[in-house]
Amino acid sequence: MFDTEALGFGDVIGFRGHSDVVTLTVPAPDGLRPEALDATVELPANIARGSIDVESDGRLLARVDLPPGISTVPVSIPLGGATIENQAAVVTLRLNLFAVDNICPEDWTDRSAALRDGVVRYTGTPTDPAAVADFLPPVLERLDLYLPAEPSAVESDTAVGLASAVTARYTGRPLTVDVREIPPNGIPPAAESPFVRQIVVTETDGTDSGAEIGAVPGGPSALYVKGDTESLATQARIVTSIVSGLAVSSEVYAEPRTVPPQQSPDITTLDDLGIGDQTATSVGVAQVRLYLDQARFGRPVGDLQLDLKGSYTPLPETESGLLTVEAGDTLLDSWAAESSGIIDRAITVPPEAMQRSTELTVTLRTTGGERHCGTTQPVTLMINGDSHVSSTIADPPVPDGFASLPQTLMPKFDVAATGSGIVDTARAVDIVAGLQSLTPILLDTEWVTADEAVASSAPAVIVAADGTIPGDLPLRLTDTEDRRFEIVGAEGASASLTFGTDVIYASLQVFRDNDRTVLVATSTDAPAELDRTLTWLAVDPDRWPGLTGHVLFTAEGRDPVALVDPRGDVLVPAEQDASPTVRWALIGTGVLVTAGVVAAGVLLVLRRNRPRPQ
C-alpha cells in the first residue's frame, strides 16, 4: 500500500461546494491492481445526507454513503473495478452533499468535504522489470546510484543527470536519491523493496556501451549503464527520455545527440506553459487557479503581463457578479460581470507579487437570487489556453535568494566539486535533486571542474565541503569572527549581536556573481556539518521549496537557520563596518545558541546523518 502523498495526490484530497468532481490517476505498477482508497473524510456541518460516486471509464463502480451529523468518519472507496491503461487507473470521485433544509451554507464554497490520511491498497505481486523501458515503475520510493569510489568526471556528470531526470519524472512525490559505492563484484546488494531501483554507472573504453537490465540475487533487477566519455551520459538518458518506451529489450544502445537548452520567448501562451484551458463550475463562486512557474519560462521573469481571455455563464437579471484576479494575497484587477460573458482583460503582475511559482486566481462571484442547493443554476468560468503571456528577463531576479532557484540556473548550469571522490559527487547529487524537486521542468546540468565553474559565465552549483573555493567568488558569509548581526525574528523583534570568535559552521549560499547566480555548499573545514545540512533538507520534501533568504546557516551541533540579507551586502568584520549594522532576518521561530550567541531562529527536528558512501 502507498499513501496519497507518495502517489502524487498530496496529503489532502479536497472537494468544493455541495457538488464537485475530483479525478485521480492512481498508479498501477506491473503485477498490481489498486483495490481501495482508505481515508478519513472530513465533512462540513449541516449535512442532511451525502455520497461519493466512484466512476471509471464512464461506469459507476460504487456509491459510498456519507453519514450526517459526524465531522470525521473513515471511508473505503472501492477501486477494484477501475479500468487500467498505461500503468494507471483513472478514477472519478463525484461528491454530492445535501444540506439541512436544502440551503447551501456559505462555508461550503471554498472547501466542503476532504479526504485525509489516504492510503491506496493493492492486490497482486510486483513484477520484476525485464526491459529498460519498464525499469522505472509508476511508484518509486528510492533511487540508488552506484559509482566507483573515485568517479571520473563523466561518471559524476551521469549521476547528477540521472538524479535530475528521475526526480523530474516523479515531481510532486517524495523521492530519495542515494549515491553508493559499487561493490567489488560489480553487483549491488539486493534492494529491500520492489519499489527501489538501482543503477550502476561505469565508464568504459567504448567497447562496451549501452544500458542493460541485470539480475540481482534476492532482489529486483538493476540497470547497468556503461559508455565512454562521449556516450555514457547518453546511455543513461535512455531511462527517462521520450525514447525509453522503445527500449523494449533487456539491453539497448543509444546514439549520442545534442538537445539545445530551451527558453520561453518573450511572448508565449498558457498552452505553451503547460497550463492549457482551465474550467470551473460551481454555485455562487467559480474559481480557476493558474500557476505561472518561472522555470517553465526557462529564466527569471520580470514585467509579466497576461492577456486574459475566457468566458463565463451570463447571469440572469436577478443576479449580479464580480470577477477578480489575484496573485497570492494581492488583488490585481476586478470588474463587474457583463451580459456578454466574455473575458478579455490585460492583467499586469507587479514584481513584488512574483514568486518562484506565482498563483493567479481568477474568481467569479455571484450575488442575488436564492441560494438553494440543487435549485440555483451553477455558473461556469473558463480561461482559454491561448491567452498570451508576455514577460522580460528579470535582472536582478525577483524574488531573489533561494526563491530565485531554479529559474536563475536555467537554461543550463555547471556543477562542480572541489574534491574528486564519491562523497562530493553524492553531495552534488543531493543538491541537484533538491533543486529539481522545485519544478517538473528538467534541469540541464554539466559537470565541470571547480576552476571552470568559478571562471565561467554560466550559472553554477559548487560543492566545497572543506571551505576551499578557488577564485574570488563574492560569498555572503566567509567567517564569523567579529561579525555583527541584527537578527529580526518572525514576530518583528530584533536584537543586535556580535560573534566574538570564529565558529564551526556549514552553509548553502546563493548570490549573484556579475550576471549569473551561484549556489555554493561549503563549511569551515567541517564536511560533516555540510552533510547534516543536506540530510536535513532531504528528509522533508517541504524544506527545499520552503527555503528563503540567501544563506542556510548550520552551526556545529545545531539545526539549520535561514538568513536574509535585505541590502544584498556581503558581511564584513565589525571593526571595518562604518555603515549601519548589517541587517539579517532570521525566518521562523525557535532559538539558536552557539558560541555565546542567542538569536530568534528556526529550530526544526533534525534527523541523524544519513550515512555517506563508504
Image (cartoon, rainbow, N blue to C red):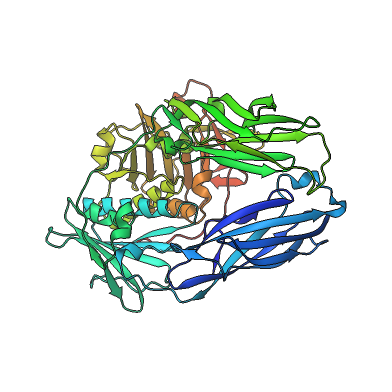
Quadrant for residue 391, please give it: top left
Question: Residue 325, position in %: x, y?
Answer: 63, 30
Of all residues shown, which one is farthest toward the top?
578
Q: Quadrant of the N terminus?
A: bottom right
Question: Residue 419, position in %: x, y?
Answer: 27, 49
Question: Residue 217, position in %: x, y?
Answer: 32, 78
Residue 68 falls left or right of residue 558:
right
Question: Residue 425, position in %: x, y?
Answer: 31, 53
* Residue 508 vs residue 175, the one in the foreground: 175
Q: In the rendered view, tell whether residue 32 sits above or below residue 117.
A: below
Can residue 351 be seen by looking at this rendering?
yes
Q: In the rendered view, tell whether residue 275 sits above or below residue 213.
A: above
Quadrant for residue 210, please give it: bottom left
* Residue 445 vs residue 30, the one in the foreground: 30
Residue 561 falls left or right of residue 396:
right
* Residue 435 vs residue 94, the one in the foreground: 94
How many marks the image carries: the answer is: 0
Residue 338 falls left or right of residue 370:
left
Q: In the rendered view, tell whether residue 520 sits above or below residue 63.
A: above
Q: Quadrant of the C terminus?
A: bottom left
Can residue 477 be seen by looking at this rendering?
no
Residue at 38 percent across and 39 percent down: it is: 519
Of all residues shown, which one is farthest toward the bottom?
218
Residue at 31 percent across and 68 percent down: it is: 222
* Residue 599 vs residue 212, the one in the foreground: 212
Residue at 66 percent across and 59 percent down: it is: 115
